[in-house]
Structures are given as C-alpha cells and as structure tokens.
Image (spheres, rainbow, N blue to C red):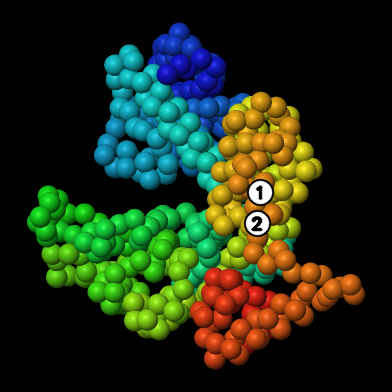
Amino acid sequence: MTSTGLKVLLVDDDASFRRVQEYQLSQAGYRVTACADGAEALDAFRSGGHDLVVTDIRMPGIDGLELLTRLKAVSAETPVVVVTGHGTIETAVEAMKQGAFDFLTKPFPGDRLRLTLERADEFRSLRREIRELRRAVESRFAFENLIGSAPAMKGLFEAMELVAPTSSIVLVNGETGTGKELVARAIHHNSLRKDRPFVTLNCGAIPATLMEAELFGHSKGAFTGAEQARKGKFEAADGGTLFLDEIGEVPLELQPKLLRVLESGSVDRLGEDAPVQVDVRIVAATHRDLPGMVDEGSFRRDLFYRLSVVPLLIPPLRERRQDIPLLAAHFLGRMARRTDRPGLEFDPATLDILESYDWPGNVRELENVIERMVVLGRSDRLTPDGVPAGIRSAGTDKDGAGFGLPPGGINLEALEIDLIRQALEREGGNQTRAAKALGLTRNTLLYRMQKYGLR
C-alpha cells in the first residue's frame, strides 16, 4: 500500500523522537505535521485535514488520552495511534477504550510505526467503503426510490412505510418476478434493525431433508455428514430480519416446528436439547395460494394466520401498465451505466410494444428483455426490431380478441366489477374457482376485489 499524500499529525514533547519519526515517515512518503504538545496538535488537527494521528501519552498540558478524546470528538473516523515510553496494560486498555487504533511502547523497531500506520490507513479506507456501501444500500431501498406510480403500488408503499418500523411479521404475496425480495429488503433497511443482518432463505431451493438443519442449525454429529456444529438461519439473523422466500414450499411436517419458533422466539438445534433464544423479525413471501393450500390441507392454518399478521400484495405488472415505461427507463439507465453507453434510448414505438405485453414473468422478465436488447442491439436507439419476436406478436394472440366494442362505448370498470360478481356467485364464493373462470390467478382476483371494495 502506498502512503503518498497521506497527512500524519505527529504529537510528542520529546524533540529527538519527534525529529526521527518525522524524518522516517517523510522518507516513506507521508506529509507530516509535527507538534510538541496537545494544544498545538488540536489546533493543527482542526484546520489541517489530517488522515492519521500519532500521539504520545505523557505530555504537559493536554496529555495523550485527553487529546485522543478531543480528536475523536472532531473526527471519529480518523485513526489515532498512541505511543508512550511508560507503557502499562492499564494505559493501553484505557487508550483502546477511548478509540485508539493501536498502542505502541517506546522504543520500537524503526519500521514499526510505519507498518502500524499502513494498517491504520487500510482500516480507515475499509470503514469509508463500508459507509459508502451502506449509504448506497439505504438509498437504493429508500421508499421514495421504489418505482411505481399506479394506485396499487402507492398503497403498497404506504403500507410498507407504516409496517417497517415495527417488528410485526409480514407476508408478501405476488407472482414470480414481481419483486418480493426487493419489498422485504426495503422493509428491513427502513426498520430499526437496518444495521443488523438481513438473511435470506429460499425455501423452494432447499431439499426437504436439509431444510430443518438450514433453518434451525445442528450440532456436530447430529446426522451423517454433520462434521461440525453450525448455526441455522434464525441464529444468523439474530437481531435482524429473516426473509423466508417461497414459504409455501416448507414441508408440512416441518411447519409445526417453524410455528413454535415464531411463537416462542427460541430455536432447537438438531442434536441439542437446550433451546437458543433469538430475536428475529420475519418477512415471508410466496407466489402460491396459501389460503387454498390451507383448504387442501397442505399448509397449516395456524401457521398461515401467524405469518399473515401484515399481508402485502404486489400486483402483477399487467395490472399496472402505467409503471412499465418508468421501470423500462430505470433498467435502461442501469444498463447505460453498466455498458458505458450514455446515449441509450427507446424508440416510442418500442415502449408501446412493451406496454401492450402482459409480462407473465413480471418485472424480472422486463429487466431481462431490456438487457438482452441492449447487449444484442447495434444502435443506442432501441427500436421495435430489437424486441423479442414473441413479445412483438403477443398483442395479436390474446384471448378475447373477438370482443366487439359497442357503438356507444362501455364503462370498463363497471363491466369488470359485474364479471367478478358473476364469477363469485356462480362458484358459490370460492375465490380460487372464480379466479380460474376469469382467467386470473387468485392473487390477482383478490387484488381486484380489494380495489373495488368487493367482499
């Protein structure tokens, strides 16, 4: 690591030591400001923009520990290395408690201070990177940066904003590709747990035989292949949020144990008798019809009620077509930055095609299609020719294309309400069958019933 350009504040009342260290550090490429006492150093630090500080402990007036405290009040991020010719364990402990990066006892080898400052600068850079990454993450998941202007999305964002500061369990329902994990992360990063872990588990990607160990952990030798003890996802998320994606895939025989953890807050590792207490906020998600699964007996009713304390429904993209241009522009901007092509733009006809498509894969499919168009496109202007053929032709192949619009027009909303009522009445109130009769998923039917105030 190079030290070129780094400014070091060196504070020591021993003129000989100060001259030697100033020379050695200057030879190593540091720009050194040398001070003989704490008061002079504090003035220099306030106006000098120093990257690192080296200070003696015993000095007249403001001693090293007091200077350390004052420096940290000015800039908590600046690493401070404390040196002394009268080192004791108590002094070292006190210096570290007050925020010193390291503690050196005189005399030390000629390169010891330089190596310590290199480590201190690495630590400073790492903290800055972490801070910038955290700021970027918080910005990405800020509610005002979530994309969607449709009324249903505005209602979703309002509900997320209300539930985020709480510890309530949230159940996110939506078709594949609608952004359920994005909703879960936004809730976490706007909660009081944002500085604690966000742990994810896709319940549909774990074999049923391994899911219990994955969730709750296991001791060494608990089963064949368990060569060492391991924490489960609940313990890994302690103090933070556990996102259980595709919760509908949890095997029926494991659901009672999951329910017990949610109710008691304690985890039983496989192979151990003593429970482990955890503090975890649960956000679960599914694309499946959990009420229908409850009726079928493949999902426990008590677990469903425990999970759906605050249910959130993400409407499919075809139910909020006005958001398609916004999302498309967002994804195109991301690709422009990624490929260093700032001139990327849509032909208006291309946007018309994108808006007319039903997007069965929802937002994820839209993002993938735009990436494909950018990668394979020869021009920065994305024209209809670049849209995949299946999407271009989909508009002419939709069911119901033979419906004729009456000369006097229709009230589309009233027609939709009437059709939903007819379907529910015909199916005796069974929402799953009514949704099938209308060519909808049950989640979409529920969304439209909520939209129109139908019960």
Give me the disc on residue 393.
1
Q: Secondary structure at mark 1?
A: helix
Residue at the image point whose x is 60% and y is 90% from the top = 425
Tag 1: residue type? Ser
275 with respect to 45 (left or right) = left
Seen from this angle, which residue lies furthest right?
408
200 with respect to 314 (left or right) = left
- Residue 198 on image: x %, y %: 43, 55
Tag 2: residue type? Asp
Q: Are marks 2 and 1 in contact (CB under 8 Å)?
A: yes
Label 1: few (<14), some (14–19) or many (≥20) C-alpha neighbours in 10 Å: few
Residue at the image point whose x is 69% and y is 54% from the top = 395
Q: CA distance from mark 2 to mark 1?
A: 7 Å
Label 2: few (<14), some (14–19) or many (≥20) C-alpha neighbours in 10 Å: few
Q: Is residue 143 above or below residue 387?
A: below
- Residue 411 on image: x %, y %: 82, 76
Residue at the image point whose x is 49% and y is 27% from the top = 52
Give me the disc on residue 183.
none
Q: Which residue is mark 2?
A: 397
- Residue 13 on image: x %, y %: 45, 23
